[in-house]
Image: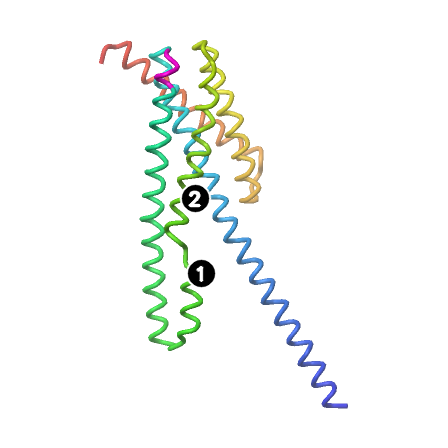
Amino acid sequence: MASKNDVRIHVSEDKTEQHDQVCIEEDFDYSQRGQWLRAAVLGATDGLVSVASLMMGVGAVKHDVRAMILTGFAGLVAGACSMAIGEFVSVYSQRDVEEAQLKREKRTTGNNDEENGEKEALPNPVQAAAASALAFMLGAIMPLLAAAFIGDHKVRLGVVVATVSLGLVIFGWIGAVLGRTPVLKSCFRILVGGWMAMAITFGLTKWIVSSGL
């Protein structure tokens, strides 16, 4: 009877350990996905606000749709490259630090298998750079598409502002859900920030041209 009880206890303990391990892995996966999604939302928001503000600045002094589109496209390309390079350098530096830490731990413990497994879990700089660039382009393309097919200057500016506002609300909602923060407050903050960026760029550009600087 004692041996049977021992077997049951061992089986129960094994199942509990396996369940705990699965839970830890699931939590880790969701945490990693959440970080990637939040970074993607930030990149898309950056692209949306940056390119829209550039287009509004040019639209303040030029009525030509071609000038607005070219400016927005240049901002899209420059911003995507900047995001990719910055993310690549940042993640590569982080990876170097973590690899150095793993080497120090290896000298202390001598466990090569664990080190190899942890190396595979380190962030990939190329993937991070590509994800940041794509996220920026996704946000930046919205005001470009909104302005591309509208001839009237004032209507075009209004459509760009409306499109950006809708995009900011969507990105704010996604960020709030991922970060588990109040949705209304998050959407309000990001919406006001986007409006301020466009208004400041529009106003300063118009002032500089009108003052003859």
Q: Nearer the viewer, residue 154 or 129?
A: 129
Mark 1 residue element: loop
**88 is higher (above) or lower (below) than 202:** below
Crowd around label 2: few <14 · some 14–19 · many ≥20 (10 Å): many
View extreme (left): residue: 213
The three-letter amino acid code for the residue at tag 1 is Ala
Tell me which corner region of the image, top left, top right, bottom left or bottom right, holds residue 44: top left
The main secondary structure of the magenta stretch is: helix
Magenta stretch containing residue 67, yes or no?
Answer: yes
Point out the image quarter for the C terminus. top left
Crowd around label 1: few <14 · some 14–19 · many ≥20 (10 Å): few
The numbered mark, 1 or 2, whose residue comes first in the sequence reads: 1
Q: Position of residue 148 (x, y in %)?
A: 44, 19
Residue 121: mark: 1
Q: Judge left or right: residue 3 versus residue 85.
A: right
Q: Residue at x 73, y 85 (%)?
A: 5
Using the numbered discs, state the Cα–Cα distance from disc 1 to disc 2 in whole angstroms.
17 Å
Tell me which corner region of the image, top left, top right, bottom left or bottom right, holds residue 183: top right
Tell whether label 2 touches label 1 (CB within 8 Å): no
The three-letter amino acid code for the residue at tag 2 is Ala
Q: Residue at x 42, y 36 (%)?
A: 136
Q: Judge left or right: residue 7 versus residue 128.
A: right
Q: Residue at x 56, y 62 (%)?
A: 25
Residue 131: mark: 2
Magenta stretch containing residue 73, yes or no?
Answer: no
First to last magenta residue range: 64-68
**189 is higher (above) or lower (below) than 15:** above
**106 is higher (above) or lower (below) than 166:** below
Q: Position of residue 65 (x, y in %)?
A: 39, 14
